[in-house]
Amino acid sequence: MTSYTAARRLRALLAEPGCRTMPCCFDALSARLVEQAGFPLTFMSGFAVSAARAALPDTGLLSVTEMLDQGRSICDAVSIPVIGDGDTGHGNVVNVHRTVAQFARAGFAGIMIEDQVAPKRCGHTGVRQVVERAEAERRIRAAVAAREAGADLIIVARTDARSALEAAAGPERALAEAIDRLKAFADLGADVLFLEAPRNEAEMARCTREAPGLHMVNMLEDGITPLLPDARLAELGYKLAAYPLTLLACAVHAMQVALAQLGAGQVPQYRVSFEALRALVGFDAYDAMLARYEAPPKASR
């Protein structure tokens, strides 16, 4: 699926009523599982990719090349739209422009650009700095310019100002600045707005009320933001509910349990069958294609 087609499908999903649960993936296999479970879209989580690909923290250590390589594998493995984590754009505004263009060529339907100071870090692990609002706006302007130049992606504009500015300005002023940034991002042409790490329902409601537009929220287990059902999130004005680490955390737990059982001399019982694994990665389709090409060609008249 081309980026243009993926972006069109994502726009259609965003136009539908309600709030969409969006499980986040970290590789091609997890993305395929999301699709097979019936979810209409997914998000390539930067935290999860850093962990799964390199066993590293989400602190800007992976390069844009590594993220694109992972993203191409993910987009190739599924037919549902995928939003990619573009972090800070991997440099200045020219880098932002190029990053957006590269994500479009990789097959993504959307990209998230944030306003942290590089190197960034996971928004629930103590964000310390965001760039000045003018620089944050320049990043979104560059992303929109890349879209207008042909990189047809949904632009998700994220701010971490609520966390980064709290110590110096207090929670009220930090939240107000974050909302002002989101309003500016929307005016510049961002498609989806994302306030990272609101502390409670009141802050979540204020964000969507004061910054009109489509909103995304992170539902991180054991994180800062309260976990709410989709129905309640829709009432609060949210369109996308991202679950950034659910699949990764569950996979890690399952592997730890299996390893403990193997260490105790047991064969792990909670697993999918070998037949299911074969089907998941496409052995049957591979064999069917191989058989078609190995069959003798029909004689021409």
Image (cartoon, rainbow, N blue to C red):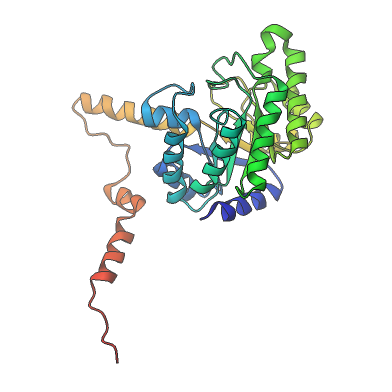
Residue 297: x, y in percent? 26, 79
Kindly identify the residue that appears in the image at 74 percent across and 26 percent down. 181
Q: Residue furthest front?
A: 94
Q: Along the horizontal axis of the image, is 179 left or right of 43?
A: right
On the image, which quarter does residue 263 sit in? top left
Residue 213, given in percent of the width and then of the height, sits at 76, 38
Single out the residue that lies furthest toward the bottom: 301
Q: Residue 27, relative to residue 149: is it above or below?
A: above
Pick the residue in front: 31 or 4: 4
Q: Quadrant of residue 201?
A: top right
Which residue is most to the left? 265
How far across and how far down the image is residue 217, in percent? 64, 31
Residue 33 can be seen in this image: no
Q: Quadrant of the C terminus?
A: bottom left
Residue at position x 71%, y 29% from top? 137
Q: Is residue 96 above or below residue 286?
A: above
* Residue 115 percent across, percent down from the top left: 64, 25
Left or right of 266: which side holds 233?
right
